[in-house]
């Protein structure tokens, strides 16, 4: 009989699948390129830009849209995820 440990994951799993969201934030889409699948959102109140990948979108976004989003730690800083237009 073969036993499989379902908890065993490669070490890289945690690097790419961090689900610990920092906070829900509000901001404005500064730029988004549909063809390349990425853009930037300027966070309200701190005037800081956050990278957003197309996989982090809930709604379709355009430049100037006001959005809510979660911040998630990425390889190069905080990324916007769960982005939805408000």
Image (spheres, rainbow, N blue to C red):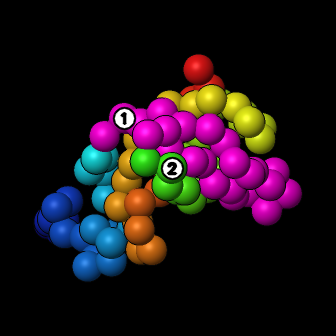
Residue in the image at 43% along x and 40% along y: 45
Do we see residue 54 in this rendering?
Answer: yes
- The answer to which of 78 and 1 lies nearer the viewer is 78
Where residue 37 sits, quadrant-wise, is bottom right
Residue in the image at 41% along x and 68% along y: 77
Q: Indicate which disc residue 78 carries.
A: none
Residue 63 in percent (x, y) is at 77, 41
User: What is the magenta segment's predominant secondary structure?
Assistant: strand
Residue 36 in percent (x, y) is at 79, 62
Q: Is residue 64 above or below residue 31?
A: above
Residue in the image at 58% along x and 31% along y: 67
Residue bearing mark 1: 24
The CA span between labels 1 and 2 is 15 Å
Q: In which quarter of the image is the C terminus?
A: top right
Disc 1 crowd rating (10 Å Cα; few below 14, some 14-19, many 20+) is few
Q: Quadrant of the N terminus?
A: bottom left
Residue 47 in percent (x, y) is at 51, 49
**Element at label 1:** strand
Residue 24 in percent (x, y) is at 36, 35
Is 55 a magenta residue? no
Is 30 a magenta residue? yes
**Element at label 2:** loop
Disc 2 crowd rating (10 Å Cα; few below 14, some 14-19, many 20+) is few
Residue range (magenta): 23-45
* Image mark count: 2
Residue bearing mark 2: 47
Mark sitting earlier along the chain (1/2):
1
Residue in the image at 20% along x and 59% along y: 6
- The answer to which of 48 and 21 lies nearer the viewer is 48
């Amino acid at each position: 009989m073969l036993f499989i440990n379902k908890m065993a994951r490669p070490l890289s799993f945690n690097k790419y699948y961090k689900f610990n969201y920092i906070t829900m934030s509000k901001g404005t889409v500064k730029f988004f390129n549909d063809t390349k699948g990425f853009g930037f959102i300027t966070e309200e109140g701190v005037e800081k830009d956050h990278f957003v990948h197309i996989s982090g979108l809930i709604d379709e976004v355009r430049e100037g849209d006001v959005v809510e989003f979660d911040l998630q730690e990425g390889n190069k800083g905080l990324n916007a995820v769960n982005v939805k237009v408000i």
